[in-house]
Amino acid sequence: SNAGINAATGGNINVCAPGVDVLSSYPKKNGSNTGYKLLNGTSMATPYVSGLAALYMEQFPALDARKIWKLLESKAKPIEGLKYRDIGKGLIQVIQG
């Protein structure tokens, strides 16, 4: 979501993940009985990336964190029509090895 803000100092987007209309737990308010809400933003996308990194670490225990990161980037799927500054290498992908 930062679209390359501070790119000169390293603040750029490397990969992207779902972050729109993600069903998330949410405090019940005003008689709501669900405790869930559709939310948007990096707070919704970040758990996908960290969760996939954890799965890769379990699947490939011989790889260090830097190699896991390279794996995330190398397997990301570019999204046609979207700029690199907005999605980096692309949408993270689950792989089986």
Image (cartoon, rainbow, N blue to C red):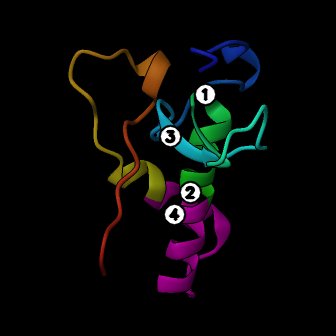
Q: Secondary structure at mark 2?
A: helix
Indicate the amino acid at tag 2.
Trp
Residue named by callout 3: 22
Q: Give the mark nearer the N terminus: 3 vs 1.
A: 3
Q: Give the mark nearer the N terminus: 3 vs 2.
A: 3
Residue 60: in magenta span: yes
One can see residue 15 in this view: no
Residue named by callout 2: 69
Residue named by callout 4: 52
Residue occupying the point 23% across, 15% down: 81
Determine the main secondary structure of the stretch shown in magenta: helix
Mark 3 closeness class: few <14, some 14–19, many ≥20 residues within 10 Å: some
Residue 59: in magenta span: yes
Indicate the amino acid at tag 1.
Gly
Q: Position of residue 31 (x, y in %)?
A: 74, 37
Q: Nearer the viewer, mark 4 or mark 2?
A: 4
Q: CA distance from mark 3 to mark 2?
A: 24 Å
Residue occupying the point 78% across, 43% down: 27
